[in-house]
Amino acid sequence: MGSTFGGINTALTSLYAQRRGLDVTGENIANANTEGFTRQKVRMQAQAGGVHPGIYSTTDQVGAGVAVSGVERSRNEYLEERGRAEHASSAYLSTQKGSYDLIESVLAEPSDTALQARLHDMWDGWNDVANNWQDPSTRSALLERSRTVAITLNDTYASLSGQFTANRNQLDAYVDQVNTLATSIADMNQQIVVAQSAGLEANELRDQRDVKVMELAELTGASAQSKKSGAVNVYIGNGALVNDFSARTVRLAGPATLDSLTPANHVALKWNDTDTAAAAGGTMGAMLDTMNTIIPDVTAKLDDVASKLAATVNTALAGGVDENGDPVTGGYDLNGDPGTAMFAGATAKTIEVIIDDPDKVAFSKGFPKDPDNAIAALDNGVADALADVGIAGTGPDQAYQAMIGQLGVAAQSAARRSEIQDSVTDQVDTSRDAESGVNLDEEMTNLLTYQRGYEAASRVLTTIDSMLDQLINRTGLVGR
Amino acid sequence: MSIPSRVTGTSVHTRVIGDLQRNLAHGQKLTSQISSGKQLSRPSDSPTGTVTSMQLRGEVRATQQHSRNANDGLGWLGTIQDKLGDASTSVIRVRDLTLQAMNQSNTDQSREAIAVEIDNIKATLIGEANSKFMGRPVFGGTTPGGEAYDTTGKYVGNDGQTTRTVGPNAKVRIETTGPEAFGAENSPSQLFTVLTELSQNMRDNDMDKLGTGLQNLDKAHDLLKATLSDVGARYNRVTQMKQSAEDHLLSVSSQLSDIEDVDLPKAIMELQIQQTSYQAALAATAKVIQPSLIDFLR
């Protein structure tokens, strides 16, 4: 047998619960467009009546209403982990694609104005000298075109070096951002753990923390692990960035310019306390790869082109050893002096033309000052041989074309992988959103449900009230 | 593409924006292809196409080079042809004069007059043997000096050859050395030696030696004619190579265009289709995104 006023209490619990439901629905609707917001659901639990048998405890075997057992956050941990991994890959590939785009713009092939066209102009210049070395303007034009080739190589190297430096500066800014995020995640960990152990709900804090962890995942490829206490540990590679309430810091180490990069001295992300390398992925990982691998690769190949160019032209002019190791005799210039080298420096950064006087260009294979009249000759042998280099199979042009081909393949594959990864990431994001996003139709329906529940509960209250009124105020009133 | 079990406003929004972006990116690529006229603007568009296009550009340059070389060669060979033709005409005149001198009825004065004319012809011929093209003596080989023959008719050049590349692996010799055209030095049938001796023998009135001189003159003339026809053959060959270089240039340019240039009608059609599909996507988006239950509740 329950108490007289037990029904009122039941209705009252229902009023509380429906009000709570309405509040949560209001919260969901208010945050429908908030980034990183997880929809919340009210968990209601029917209250049991007395279930412990005892001599003096009685029960009318009816439950005691409803209570809100908790406000749940609908987020699937597995989907979240996948989301972080896919976002990290996406950031890595799109940054890599951006780097390749920049390198391709610097080289600007195929075109009529880039290095390949300049090389052709230079070989044409040698052909003009071979046809008409008597005219000093052909030799001046040749020197000018050779200078243009050297300057183009210098400029290309300078642009790539500039890209390296820009990447490094950007990385410095990112490193600061990573350290700030790590500290704030550690702080939020503390707040959430304290709240959870006190039984308070910290759903909004968790949402904010998840947004920050996703940012870290995109920046560094970080992974996260949640613990029962409510804290989240964040790892970069195998090293912990955030461990419960404490955060470690990272810094950028390594050369500041492309020139000081060596195989032993790479740019790397290092932990401040142990000075070991952190295996970063994501945007920062892609930038590190660009600086350590992609750009040096391209400049090495460019250096190869420059050294082949210098070796070919210098050997033909001044004598030396060709690529098979056979000795080659040099040429003679207009005045019969032996030829001097045209290019100094064998890398893209340092190559330059050192002949200023057109009369010093050694185009002739024959020696004009030989005392024997039958042997003295002034021909175009050297110029002719150099004019053929442009279409031969092993000269600097071929090395350059091979480099462009390899760059094109790498850039194309990076672009394709980035596209594919983007659509995979979109799918995972859609799944995550399906789990934790706010659907306004659903909220509207919930609003209706809770509203009617509230109305019905208050109706129950009114009914019990009128029944009690009947009992209390009308019973036993005889004759009035 | 899997449809998730629960669809939210944000997920529809993200999906739709992503799809519209992809559509727009495709449209942008087509637009830039049409406005630049090139479907190959960076190596990553087609790596193999880029390498082929660079090689073809190299071949275009090489073919243009061959054409220029052929023009230059024709200049040289043309000059040589003209001069050898003139020399041949002069030699025929000398022959007539010699026959006239061998006539017994000549007096000393008339023979003297003929000898003087032969001397003049010899001076003219030496001048022609020293003619230049673009500042180089065409009969001098690769001599560093500026002359092929000195004033006495002695060869002061050398026997080096000059060639021009007029096709792939095709080098044609564009000059003739003096000894090849006018007779080897110190040979009795060297043209200038013969002329000197003829005028001397005429003054000495030595008929036997005039007879031998006439034979030597004929030998020199035969050599001259043979060289002339050889030069003519080379001239024809270079003309042919020049024509073939120009034909090759056309074909290589058209190959290059196939690889690099965009097919304009095709690209414009694709752009139209893409625009239509973009508009359809926008209309569908507008229909899906707007309504919600809120519109229908009291």
Image (cartoon, rainbow, N blue to C red):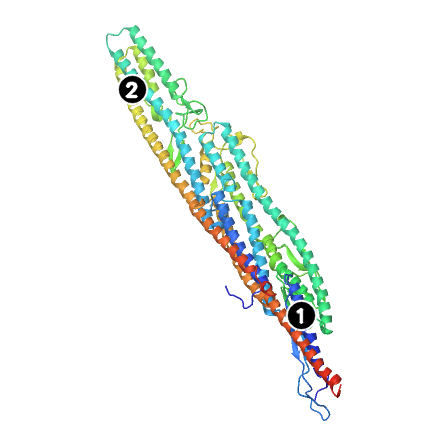
Report x, y in % for residue B222: 28, 24
Q: Answer yes or no: is residue A263 visible.
A: no
Quadrant where the C terminus of chain A is found in the figure: bottom right
**Residue type, numbered disc 2:** Leu
Q: Secondary structure at mark 2?
A: helix
Q: Residue at x 71, y 92 (%)?
A: A54
Residue at image mark 2: B217
Count of marks, rendered view: 2
The quarter of the displayed image where residue B212 is located: top left
Residue at image mark 1: A22
Report x, y in % for residue A330: 49, 36
Report x, y in % for residue A292: 60, 54
Measured along the vertical axis of the image, is residue B148 above or below residue A429? above
Residue B10 left/right relative to A462: left
- Residue placed most toward the observer, B89 or A459: A459
The quarter of the displayed image where residue A278 is located: bottom right
**Residue type, numbered disc 1:** Leu
- Residue placed most toward the observer, A380 or B190: A380
